[in-house]
Image: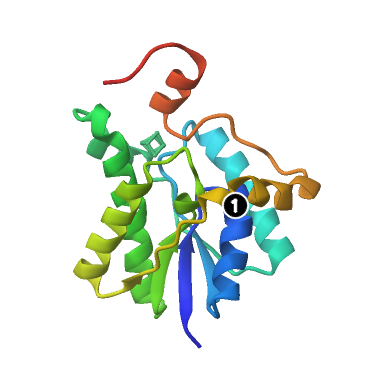
Amino acid sequence: MKSVLIHCCCAHCTAYTANYWRQQGYEVSALWYNPNIHPYTEHQQRLEAMKSLAQEMNLPLTVTNGYDMITYFRQVVGHESQRCRYCFRLRLSKTAETARQMDFSAFTTTLLISPHQKHDLIKEIGNQLAEETGIAFLYADPRKHYSESRHLTKPLNLYRQQYCGCLYSELERYTNIVIE
Ligand code: SF4
């Protein structure tokens, strides 16, 4: 059976995405690797929500060791206006590499369902990594199902984040400051 490792940014984007790839005939597993979520306590709250969803959906979940916040900042500092490119690449390259090590036929990401993310950039980086690693990148555009995914998680009463993840996004969410 064909299999896919899905990088999961949060429980709420995972619900529809995991169902979607199951419906396409894939054996689906989830990977948690989000060193872009700050601070640590916020990261843990989102991870706990993800664990609850995985249990509910009977979805195998791999959680990477440690919390690579320092790696995230070492890559981003100095080019903050381009931070999402570095952030996507960091998370997706870990996913592709883990998929290769664990013998999955493909990898993808829940980030593709979000209308708030730079969709074309995610697609570009996914395709680049597929070429570099030899693991297929599964692309889909489920953005019109974003709300549906949130409806799926509503009865579970899981923690819902208020900003994308990094400290820069938190600042932009609560002020008029734009990081450039
Ligand atoms: S805004 Fe979101 S995607 Fe962009 S760098 Fe921050 S956490 Fe990553």
Residue that badge 1 annotates? 145
Residue at the limit of the structure toward the front, as seen here: 144
Q: How is the image coloured?
A: rainbow
- Residue 71 in view (yes/no): no
Residue at the limit of the structure toward the right, as seen here: 155
The answer to whether 85 is drawn above or below residue 60 in the figure is: above
- Residue 76 in view (yes/no): yes
Q: Residue at the location (65% across, 61% down)?
A: 54
Q: Residue at the location (39% across, 80% down)?
A: 103
The answer to whether 167 is drawn above or below residue 12 in the figure is: above
The type of residue carrying mark 1 is His
- Quadrant of the rendered image holding ligand 1: top left
- Nearest to the observer: residue 143 or residue 21: 143
Q: Residue at the location (59% across, 43% down)?
A: 46
Q: Using residue 45 as the reference point, say whether residue 94 is left or right of it.
A: left
Q: What x and y, as percent, mark residue 10?
A: 56, 48
Q: What x and y, as percent, mark residue 147?
A: 64, 45
Q: What x and y, as percent, mark residue 33?
A: 44, 53
Q: What x and y, as percent, mark residue 88?
A: 34, 47
Q: Using residue 46 as the reference point, say whether residue 165 is left or right of it.
A: left
